[in-house]
Amino acid sequence: MATQIFFNLPVKDLNRSVEFFAALGFSFNPDYTDENATCMIINENAYVMLLVDTFFKTFTSKEVANSKDSAEAIIAYSVDSREAVDEAVKTALASGGSPSEDSQDYGFMYNHSFQDPDGHLWEVMWMDPAGPPADSVAADSMSTDGSAGPQS
């Protein structure tokens, strides 16, 4: 069985967050949705739990970061083309998100980012299925087993 991953993010307005991410094409599992939370489906093994702030706070004794002022993480997801990257960011901005960083084009990889209505950072990326060219800096920084580091 593949490992599943669940990101838990605090949100101010659950309905606004659902509308925002639905505009980006994400769906939600109604079995894990109520007035406090929803389960946004990334794929069959990755999910984002959007939790109303007060409910999120019941899972930690730590202070919850103000994502409008601080970066707690950057959540990246892939799409099928460069055009889909640009379309996702355009949709995010039109749906209540805000700009984050400028797009970055590495030839074999292209990404752009936005902030959701709560200020969480999202990066949309496309990577050439063939990977980086053999003579690229990215390829040189990968070892033969795929881990970071110089090749032997």
Image (cartoon, rainbow, N blue to C red):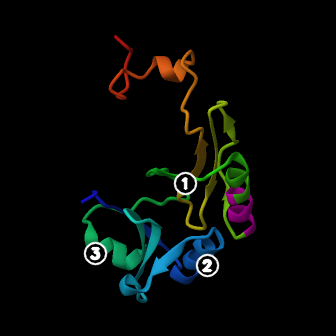
**Who comes first in sequence, dot 1 or dot 3?**
3
Query: Few, some or many C-alpha atoms within 10 Å of disc 3 (few <14, some 14-19, many ≥20)?
Result: few
Q: In the image, what residue type sits under mark 1?
A: Leu
Q: Residues within 10 Å of mark 1 (few under 14, many from 20)?
A: many
Residue drawn where x is 43% and y is 69% of the image:
10
Q: Do callouts 2 and 3 mark residues in contact (Cβ within 8 Å)? A: no
* Bounds of the magenta segment: 88-94
Residue 6: percent from left, percent from top: 35, 63
Residue 68 drawn above or below residue 25: above
| Magenta residue check for 110 | no
The residue sitting at the top extreme is 152
Q: Is residue 54 left or right of residue 99?
A: left
- The residue wearing badge 2 is 19
Q: CA distance from mark 2 to mark 3?
A: 24 Å
Q: Which mark is residue 23?
A: none
Q: Is 46 rendered above or below residue 81?
A: below
Position of residue 37 relative to residue 152, above or below, is below
Could you tell whether 20 is left or right of 140 in the image? right
Residue at position x 56%, y 60% from top?
Answer: 119
